[in-house]
Amino acid sequence: MSRILLTLCLGLSVMILPAAGSESVSDFQLEIRDTSNNLIQAFPVNDNEWCLYWNHSVTGIAVQDCYRIEKKQLLLSHSWQPDFAAGLGHVEGRGILSEHPEGGYLISEINEPVTNNALWLRVGSRSVSHTLVSGNRELNLSEIAAGQRLLLLLNTTP
């Protein structure tokens, strides 16, 4: 009987664990907190990179702001902007501006540290669709907290 139970447990553990190489490693999490510092949700960061995808509230164009983690420090890495709409654009000396192969503009090598590994965000409406993306994971913040001010806090403890 114990041999059957051991075989069953081993079989279940193989089914629960992802296959090697099928998913990126998550070393860090973004804690999504409200203005009272209550944890709303934790979002795993895969391969030390994550992006915030959103649609410009005036023009509707899709924008991607991407971050990476180096030595437990969150850095704004690059931004892809199809157009320089209101509030968007390139600041001389802050990253390298180039054309993106899929259209629009890429501002690369920004490498700007995010103070205290914390980013405040006023979450836009469903049409703005503020969405966290890392690896194959997505979390649409606009669906769970439209109009709210949220803190995206990098948790660097395993």
Image (spheres, grey):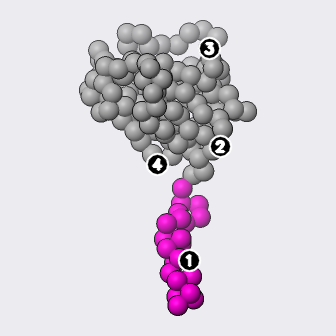
Residue under label 2, please give it.
158
Which of the two discs, 2 and 4, labels the residue nearer the N terminus?
4
Numbered circle sitting on residue 154:
none
Alpha carbons under labels 2 and 4: distance apart = 20 Å
* SS state under label 4: loop
Looking at the image, residue 4 lies above or below residue 130: below
Is disc 3 in contact with disc 1, using a CB cutoff of under 8 Å? Answer: no
- The dominant secondary structure in magenta is helix
Q: Does residue 99 appear in this view? A: no
Give the residue at the far right of this rendering.
Answer: 71
Residue at 54% x, 56% y: name it: 23
Residue under label 3, please give it.
94
Is disc 1 in contact with disc 4, using a CB cutoff of under 8 Å? Answer: no
* SS state under label 3: loop
Numbered circle sitting on residue 136:
4
> What's the residue type where badge 1 is placed?
Leu
Looking at the image, residue 16 lies above or below residue 42: below
**Which part of the image, by quadrant, shows the C terminus?**
top right
Magenta segment range? 1-23
> What's the residue type where badge 3 is placed?
Arg
Give the residue at the far front of this rendering.
Answer: 1
Is the residue marked by circle 3 packed among few (<14), some (14-19), or many (20+) residues within 10 Å?
A: few
Mark 3 vs mark 1, foreground winner is 1
Alpha carbons under labels 1 and 4: distance apart = 27 Å
